[in-house]
Image (spheres, rainbow, N blue to C red):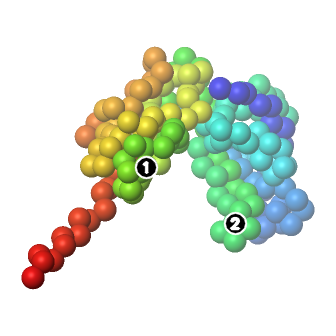
């Protein structure tokens, strides 16, 4: 898992009006919180944030904060990121300060690998899950979980219990939940000859 350095600055004032002014000035507001600390209101550059969470790990990337004494060098993870619904620009970010020795829960995307045999035979792929919740140490958070679907025939199904995860990673979703299934085309009965 990659770890980026992110520069932040403490902000003294909080509230909607202050946050709007920050966004107009090209900054975004955020907050840093965690076990054993008081929450700290911060500001940061949206471009730096986008670079820090770019790539396959996305919001699960581990970040090191720089910029002020209270949490300088702290390892954090993005716990919430609010975006503009039209433009997709970040509006507000919450950082969760973590310990590298304590397990945490995160959502990890699923990546379907290959083309199912059932799809080649005329079936339809129905992906019912696109991500799963996992529990693990921060250093072993997978960027994604690969799901091989090449052997799935029409009517075939993969469940959460069929997923292969790295050592030290536990999937928290119901093991019986369906991840992907191959639907068959309806059989058209021919009318009997007269």
Residue lying at the far right of the rendered structure: 25
At 32% from the left edge and 44% from the top edge, which residue is drawn? 153
Tell me if residue 191 comes above or below residue 34 in the rendering: below
Image quadrant holding the C terminus, namely bottom left
At 90% from the left edge and 62% from the top edge, which residue is drawn? 25
For residue 184, say whether it is visible. yes
Foreground mark, 1 or 2, reads: 1
Looking at the image, which is closer to me, 116 or 126? 116
At 34% from the left edge and 51% from the top edge, which residue is drawn? 182
Q: Are marks 1 and 2 in contact (CB under 8 Å)?
A: no
For residue 15, say whether it is visible. no
Image quadrant of residue 15?
Answer: bottom right
User: Any mark on residue 84, and which?
Assistant: 2
Read off the residue under disc 1.
120
Looking at the image, which is closer to me, 26 or 186? 186
Of mark 1 and mark 2, the one earlier in the sequence is 2
């Amino acid at each position: 898992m990659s770890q980026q350095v992110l520069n932040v600055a403490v902000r003294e004032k909080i509230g909607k009006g202050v946050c709007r002014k920050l966004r107009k000035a090209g900054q975004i507001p955020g907050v840093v919180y965690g076990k054993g600390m008081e929450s700290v209101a911060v500001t940061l550059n949206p471009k730096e944030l986008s670079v820090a969470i770019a790539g396959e790990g996305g919001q699960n990337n581990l970040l090191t904060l720089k910029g002020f004494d209270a949490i300088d060098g702290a390892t954090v993870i993005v716990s919430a990121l609010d975006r503009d619904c039209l433009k997709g620009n970040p509006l507000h970010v919450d950082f969760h300060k973590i310990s590298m020795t304590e397990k945490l829960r995160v959502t990890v995307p699923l990546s379907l690998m290959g083309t199912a045999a059932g799809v080649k035979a005329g079936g339809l792929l129905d992906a019912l899950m696109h991500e799963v919740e996992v529990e693990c140490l921060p250093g072993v958070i997978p960027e994604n979980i690969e799901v091989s679907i090449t052997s799935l025939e029409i009517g075939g199904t993969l469940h959460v219990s069929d997923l292969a995860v790295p050592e030290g990673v536990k999937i928290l979703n119901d093991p019986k939940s369906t991840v992907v299934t191959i639907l068959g085309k309806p059989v058209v009965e021919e009318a009997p000859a007269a």
